[in-house]
Image: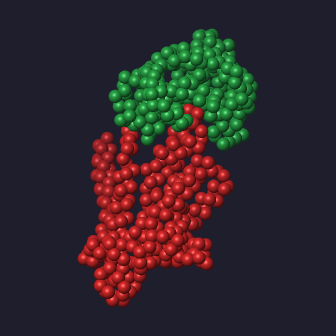
Amino acid sequence: MDFQTRSMRMNNSRRTATNYFVSGLSVLATILVIIPLVAILFYLVYKGASSLNLAFFTHAPAPVGEAGGGMANSIVGSGIILALASLMGIPIGIAAGVYLAEFGRGKPFATAVRFTADVLNGVPSIVMGISVFTLLVKGRHFSALAGGVALAIMMIPTITRTTEEMLATVPHAIREAALGLGVPKWRTAISVSLRTASPGIITGCMLAFARVAGETAPLLFTAFGNQFWSLKLNEPIAALPLQIYVYAISPYDEWHRLAWAGSLVLIVMIMVSVTLVRIFANRGVLKGGS
Amino acid sequence: MGVGILVEDLNAWYGTNHTLQDINLHIPANHATALIGPSGCGKSTFVRCLNRMHETNPIARATGIVKMGEVDIYKDASPVEIRRRVGMVFQRPNPFPTMSIYDNVASGLKLNGFRNRRILDETVERSLKQSALWEEVKDDLKKKSGASLSGGQQQRMCIARALAVDPEVLLMDEPASALDPVSTSKIEDLIFQLKSQYTIVIVTHNMQQAARVAENTGFFLNGKMVEFDSTHKIFTNPKDKRTEDYITGRFG
């Protein structure tokens, strides 16, 4: 009896120590994750903030040798390309994910699609750029649309797989509830399964969006970039990552500073759009108990 | 008003597993019929054959005749039509977690494209009154998520949801087995009231429950229906030795 109590007490203090050790490790890991993000943000603000002025947001780049100018055309161009990419990539990606999770279970075709999506996810972005170049640009000309298509193709596999995985977490009992009410299967998939999984799917779309928003390589041979204002979808269009690239490899200090400013704007734009979508998506969602 | 159900030579399989064998049975209209038997005996499969939920599993199939009134549900109708006429309540409450209480109850109508606000309002109120939940939730119908209710309330909401599409038959697959005794007795009271308007088939592991709510009881064992008779007869003077062993607890 006495021995038992003593050994239990020893065990107890060891358990407490282990508990502190493991919690400490996970806190440490969390800090390590946050450091790079905070460091990058601070560095960008330090290097780029001084070059931000009204002209940066209202003017196209100035010719070489002239002072001033901005990246307004790149900001708008990036917005257009990303809007095109999202308009194509998100619906196709989600629809394919719904197929995989709700209709394709166990079918060989679905397995093939899943495999293709995983491979596509690993294709280097420069290869994506060249492929879309061959398909849409060669023999015609560089265009905003081609840039949008390249980014859309990069978004699709991520969105498809996240959608599928999020739908897989929806309990089968909920689908049965809908089917048992005489709701057709397609309607159950859209109005019940997809709706229940929507928070996770929105996160997936945001991840895909944030990832392609900073892509440069797929745009090199598609959107190409433009030093002037252009809003036409069938002409070369400016994009922030391309402009940053052009400025960063230039020999001029002034352009280097603009590249830093552009990077800062790009990161802030991604953060703001992701945050806005989250706030918007959370509105009107009833919080479940249990 | 409920309809009677006539089952002839019903067989069902999961893959190669012959889970229901030659079931013949007549379930009378506007009565409660209980199905009892050990786990895995096929009683859940049986009720799932009555609204063609069985076939939602890709490896499952069924043969035989099931008639709801005049309609042979495997021949004359689509599964979707049948499920609108046959409501189902599951073992665990399964509210739609993203929907309010109101939307949960109205879901059968709304998801089938029904949009008339006045009729939806009336239906939600009627169904929640029928399932004895109205007084508890009437003030936060649209404010609270269906998933925020307690387990017993959720199950009564699921019953309201099934009643909202105005079915003729109500299938209940162990509707109270996940609930506490107070909620269970509320569900039993409900069954008692509802059976004047609907034909109710209830699967249960609780033999007192079968005795309390059902006029007729069927005993299932290993995929076969061993005996079907009035509940009184089954519990006092069963014909089959196996039924007697089961209800007296001398089984496995």
In the image, residue B148 above or below residue B68: below
Between A196 and A249, the residue placed more toward the observer is A249
The x, y position of residue A117, in whole percent, is 58, 62
The x, y position of residue A197, in whole percent, is 47, 48
In the image, residue A115 above or below residue A248: above
In the image, residue A247 above or below residue B251: below
Q: How many marks?
A: 0
Name the quadrant containing residue B68.
top right
Way the structure is coloured: by chain
Residue A210 appears anywhere in the view: yes
In the image, residue A95 above or below residue B152: below
The x, y position of residue A88, in whole percent, is 53, 60
Name the quadrant containing residue B117.
top left
Between A263 and B34, the residue placed more toward the observer is A263
Q: Colour of chain B?
A: green
Please identify the quadrant where the C terminus of chain A is shown. top left
Chain in red colour: A
Name the quadrant containing residue A51.
bottom left
> Image point 59% across, 23% down: which residue?
B169
The x, y position of residue A207, in whole percent, is 44, 61
> Image point 46% across, 77% down: which residue?
A225
Please identify the quadrant where the N terminus of chain A is shown. top left
State left or right for residue B231 relative to residue B8: left
> Image point 51% across, 39% down: which residue?
A174
Between A188 and A21, the residue placed more toward the observer is A188
> Image point 29% across, 85% down: which residue?
A67
